[in-house]
Image: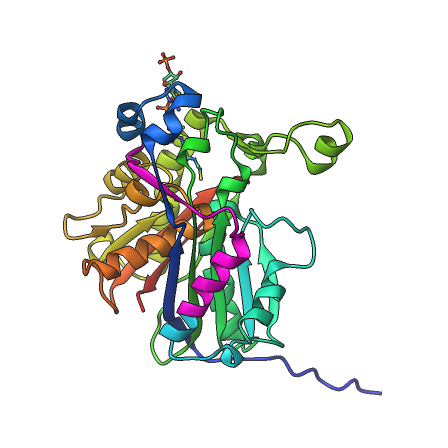
Amino acid sequence: MTRPTLTQSSGPAHSRILGLGAVRGENVVTNDDVAGPIDSSDEWIRQRTGIVTRRRARADQDVLDLAEAAGRAAIADAGLVGADIDAVILSTVTYFHQTPAGAAVLADRLGATPAAAYDISAACAGYTYGIGQADALVRSGAARNVLVIGAEKMSDFIDPTDRSISFLLGDGAGAVVVGPSDTPGIGPTVWGSDGAQAQAIRQTASWKDAIENGEPWPTLRQEGPTVFKWAAWQMAPVAAKAIAAAGLTPDDVDVFVPHQANMRIIDQLIKQLKLPEHVVVGRDIADTGNTSAASIPLAIERLKREGTASSGDLALQIGFGAGLVYAAQVVVLP
Ligand SMILES: CC(C)(COP(=O)(O)OP(=O)(O)OC[C@H]1O[C@@H](n2cnc3c(N)ncnc32)[C@H](O)[C@@H]1OP(=O)(O)O)[C@@H](O)C(=O)NCCC(=O)NCCS
């Protein structure tokens, strides 16, 4: 007896980003507002991080509210409606529920049911992980239009007395729709992890330990200098690989949008990648702070709004963070 042959899916040759949406927390929090409990100062924070203000959401908003607003804006910007979306990927580390996935709730809120929906836990690389997945889903024929949302309410996980990370963090959400394209719009994703450094950015306790031992609400901590060195020195080769994998050279790049972790890391990456002067650089961290999975799309939204980056530009983006995890790719801006 001969077995029947399976049919495997196949999709369009190319994918691209069709639309972008972004929201920042409404409250502007200054360095002076956060410096007191960590014995710091406006001057120290500006010099060491480049942050002037961070944006934080209202107490009555949760991460899904931010994600929904960004998702809605991205769908409209793509000229689509919720029913056109057939997969929703939510990248977040600040959603309070282990299950069900926030993405499923969002798909319903956005009128995207019965879209496939799942969450990604890749911290500050969550957005670029999501773009890599969406590109693969579209080109494999698994989904036609994929909504990728990076959303974080980091302020739910900060200890105001922690000097290692809390003062860096902000709240926001950025979203894009990835769909089929006649021309290449998303270069190969170069991604990876290094779990041997899992302690470098971590939750202060597991939920189980916190509840069983009556420990305080778990918040984030990091080994700042360790993370700084890893990001500044080891992420440049990853970004360089993404440029080469896309068949480009640094001269071809119009826009560079690294994860918004620290202005000094951004400057070090530019130097090591030898990016030419003409490259426009995302520096949204100065006003918005580090919004983890939301930081790259928020920085792109700002460059487009301010007119320094345009639709059709080639943008190199790289996310990196807790895991440790990282992902980079070159995309054509919507
Ligand atoms: C957190 C970070 C800003 C700290 O800056 P740094 O220059 O590495 O600071 P260090 O920890 O080496 O400490 C240098 C000095 O500043 C002091 N310091 C540390 N944190 C401080 C703070 N928040 N405010 C004021 N002083 C601080 C230290 O006590 C030390 O003082 P000393 O020289 O008198 O001993 C920096 O390490 C960083 O940005 N790391 C990576 C962040 C990141 O990317 N995180 C997210 C990953 S996605």
Residue nearest the observer in this picture, 163 or 56: 56
Residue nearest the observer in this picture, 69 or 230: 69
Using the image, determine if residue 105 lies above or below residue 92.
below
Identify the residue at the far left of this view: 277
Quarter where residue 128 is shown = bottom left
Identify the residue at the far front of this view: 60
Q: Position of residue 226 (x, y in %)?
A: 45, 27
Which residue is painted at 34% across and 45% down in the image? 288
Answer with left or right where residue 222 lies relative to residue 330. Answer: right
Q: Position of residue 115 (x, y in %)?
A: 59, 74
Residue nearest the observer in this picture, 156 or 169: 156
Q: Quadrant of the C terminus?
A: bottom left
Q: Position of residue 153 (x, y in %)?
A: 50, 47
Residue stretch rendered in magenta on the structure = 49-73
Which residue is painted at 75% across and 86% down in the image? 4
Answer with left or right where residue 296 lies relative to residue 88. Answer: left
Q: Answer whether residue 172 is magenta in the image.
A: no
Indicate the quadrant of ligand 1 in the picture: top left
Residue nearest the observer in this picture, 262 or 74: 74
